[in-house]
Amino acid sequence: MDTRLAIASKRDQRRYAKRPVDGVVVERILDAGRVTGSSRNTQKWEFVLVADKAALAEAVYAPENVATAGLVIAIVGEAASFDVGRCAQNMFLAAWDQGVVSCPNGVKDADLAAAICGGEVKAVLSFGWPVRELHVEDRSVEEWSAQANRKSLDELVRRV
Ligand SMILES: Cc1cc2nc3c(=O)[nH]c(=O)nc-3n(C[C@H](O)[C@H](O)[C@H](O)COP(=O)(O)O)c2cc1C
């Protein structure tokens, strides 16, 4: 998928088909995290594949996002939030490129998440095959951008 198209079309999805995300699809998502830049290239993260999704679901604000996901990855460690965000978005876009949808999850019980994942949890990412086919390439970058539920550049950009 074209990079601009991937960026413009990527929406967070919280409903997933009952089908695991596995094999090379997972390897590509993880590798997109691995190659992400970080402050001074410190890479202070581990990518934890969570098998007990029901347990981790209790630690996030929207449990169904995690409980029903086909794949759950926790970014664990001491990485700065900016680095974690870059890493998560790279994984999301690598997933989107392969037709896999995803959503970030706010953590409400950090202690429980840490106990399950074996370290400080900086992000919980849920992934899954979409319930309905995506048809991303049916629209142009400009169409995806125009229909995104986002502020306009007029509101966001200042010149100093
Ligand atoms: C740090 C962070 C935490 C989030 N936590 C949750 C969450 O707990 N539950 C949820 O359903 N969505 C969560 N989201 C997803 C946001 O709701 C979503 O990015 C936003 O609504 C835009 O969605 P869209 O890309 O589909 O338009 C989170 C997003 C971020 C960046």
Image (cartoon, rainbow, N blue to C red):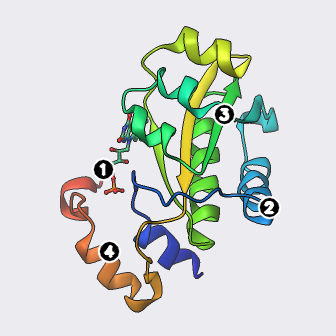
Q: CA distance from mark 4 to mark 1?
A: 26 Å
- Which residue is label 2 attached to? 23
Q: Position of residue 9 (x, y in %)?
A: 41, 72
- In front: mark 4 or mark 1? 4
Q: CA distance from mark 1 to mark 3?
A: 36 Å
* Label 1 vs 3, first from the N-terminus: 3
Q: Position of residue 53 (x, y in %)?
A: 58, 33
- In front: mark 4 or mark 3? 3
Q: CA distance from mark 3 to mark 2?
A: 19 Å
- Which residue is label 1 attached to? 160
Circle count: 4
- In front: mark 1 or mark 2? 2
Q: Quadrant for ligand 1?
A: top left
Q: Position of residue 105 (x, y in %)?
A: 45, 36
| Element class at badge 4 | helix
* Label 4 vs 3, first from the N-terminus: 3
Which amino acid, mark 2?
Gly
Q: Which mark is residue 145?
A: 4
